[in-house]
Image (cartoon, rainbow, N blue to C red):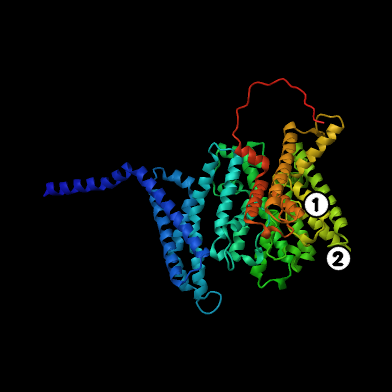
Amino acid sequence: MAKRLLFIKSSTQKDSTVAPRFIEQNQERLLKWIRSSLLLLAILAVVSIITDYGFPHDTETTYWLQRLDFFILTGFLGLGCARLILEEDKLQYAKDHWIDLVILVLILLHLILPLPISNLLPTHDGLLNLESLTRFYIILTQFFVLLPLIPPFLRYSQKLMTYNIQPTMLILVSFAILILIGALLLLLPRATVSQPLSFVDALFMSTSAVCVTGLIVVDTATYFTTLGHTILLVLMQIGGLGIMTLTTFFAYILGSDAKLKEYSAMKDLLGEENLGKIRQTVIQIALTTFVIEFLGAISLYGFLPPHSFDSHKEKLFFSIFHAISAFCNAGFALKTDNLMDTTFRYNEGALLTVMSLIVLGGIGFPVLSNMGSVLYAKVFNQKGSWASKRLTVHSKLVLITTGLLLLVGTLGFYLLETNKTLAELPFHQKFLAALFHSVSARTAGFNTVDIGKLATPTLFFMSLLMWIGASPGSTGGGVKTTTAALSLLNIIAIVSGKNRIEVFRKQVSTVAVIKAFSTMLLSIIYIATVLFILLITEHLPLESIAFEIVSALGTVGLSTGITSQLSTFGKIVITITMFFGRIGLLSTLIALTKKRSIARYRYTEENVLVN
């Protein structure tokens, strides 16, 4: 009897060690299987969300989508717990992936609590009836289905920046991928009111939104549904800030620390010389953007007349859409006539809000940051370094150039159109219209008068403003204000007999001057080449085509009304032009050109005649 009990005890001990030993021997294989299963669930989650929101479906389809969402959430929960169990150092894993664990806890609570909560809530006719509660549950479920996708996406984006890829190539590829995804989303049946877009038109609209241009081939207000408008809104926001800027910001918010290579990539993208300030710069950019857009939306909501909207919800979305569109210098509007609609055209408060957002988005984040530091130091009487209490040469150059361009643009537009398109308006409205179009022509693309009715001299004058555009590090395009300023200062220096540019008691680097002239020359060559091509393929007036090209390259969005009349080839050319305008012609060439090693020798100099 004793021998039998001893045999049973030893067998039990042996069996109890089999499972842990199997797990230990196959730990890496099991983790690999879990990661593959999580990827499959992520794909199913995306398919579920797109199917639910992008395609019309009946009650039966809705039922099966709900079952699929339940399966996805249960799968995420089970695999997440299994992965935690398999990890040897569970404390370190929890520290590194705390957001994943928080999401798992939220999913668990969501799966357990809805039934008891639904039994407690009243189901009589009113706000919390059974139908609204069911809809709320479905939306909440879809939200939780999307939550687990966030950490892997951020980690993948951060990992991408650690590869040995040029920062300019990263920008180019990220924008191209975003444009393609945006085009596919705009092709969803429920993104449009009736007839779906063609692929070329969807690609055009997606490029226009991502590159914050505003040129349209269909009426944004009436052609798209709320889903379509939301897609455009998200594309504008991501395109205006930049994918990697947003990724780095949210990764920081979720507690993920960037590596040295990532900061090195972001240094080139943001133009920040101090590697240690990259994270601070990214946080400032994102927070500044969200705060300004939030305040802009509140201001618009207050100035817009309630009778122009069917509900407060519609008015709120309208305000948010135009605040983001204005700050990102996108120029998209939810009115058929852009801002010529009476909701905006004579609404001085709303127009001043839009102009303020355009200017703040157009002067660039480096200038906003520098101005904020100076203001903070003066208001709170900080005793920091002298450099932190003054505007940089870049900020001074941007602010002065921007002010001069706004002044010249306002006077020019007023004088050219005062007896034409502005003839019927009183003086103060004429001045406001002239000021608005001086601001908008610098890459925003909003209009309160019919651009197609402007005189040819006015179109040429506005083309010059569009060509110069906004400032470096901003949401706008163009050759940039500093480029134009440095080129003009260089001409003045040469005429004065100097061989260098001196401004604000500082000497501008030769590299900056060379880049300025290269940017301007490339822009002129590109405009001339595309103009020649479109004059052959499109049977439209020369001034209208030239205006369209400059508007696309400057990511402005103003048009004389020919965009929808372009051929398929013409739309593709303008699409490419918008893309190059957002990335920058010089940056595109740098990204696509193979780098050569720097030579350790130098040839003797010899003069070349240039006059």
Distance from label 1 to label 2 (Cα)?
23 Å
Where in the figure is residue 435, as x and y percent of width and height?
A: 82, 56
Residue, disc 2: 425
Question: 48 and 583: which one is in front?
Answer: 583
Residue 106 in view here: no
Q: Label 1: few (<14), some or many (≥20) within 10 Å?
A: some
Residue 376 in view here: yes
Please determine whether, in this image, residue 263 is positioned above or below residue 476: above
Residue 455 sits in which quadrant?
A: bottom right
**Left or right of residue 430, residue 212 in this image:** left
Where in the figure is residue 179, as x and y percent of width and height?
A: 59, 52
**Left or right of residue 247, residue 119 in this image:** left
**Left or right of residue 3, residue 46 in this image:** right
Name the kind of residue labelled 2 in the image: Leu
Q: Residues at badges 1 and 2 in contact (C-beta under 8 Å)?
A: no
Mark number displayed over residue 460? 1
Where in the figure is residue 476, as x and y percent of width and height?
A: 70, 49
Question: 585 and 73: which one is in front?
Answer: 585
Mark number displayed over residue 240? none
Please determine whether, in this image, residue 47 is positioned above or below residue 494: below
Question: 352 and 166: which one is in front?
Answer: 166
Residue 522 sits in which quadrant?
A: top right
Where in the figure is residue 158, as x and y percent of width and height?
A: 54, 44
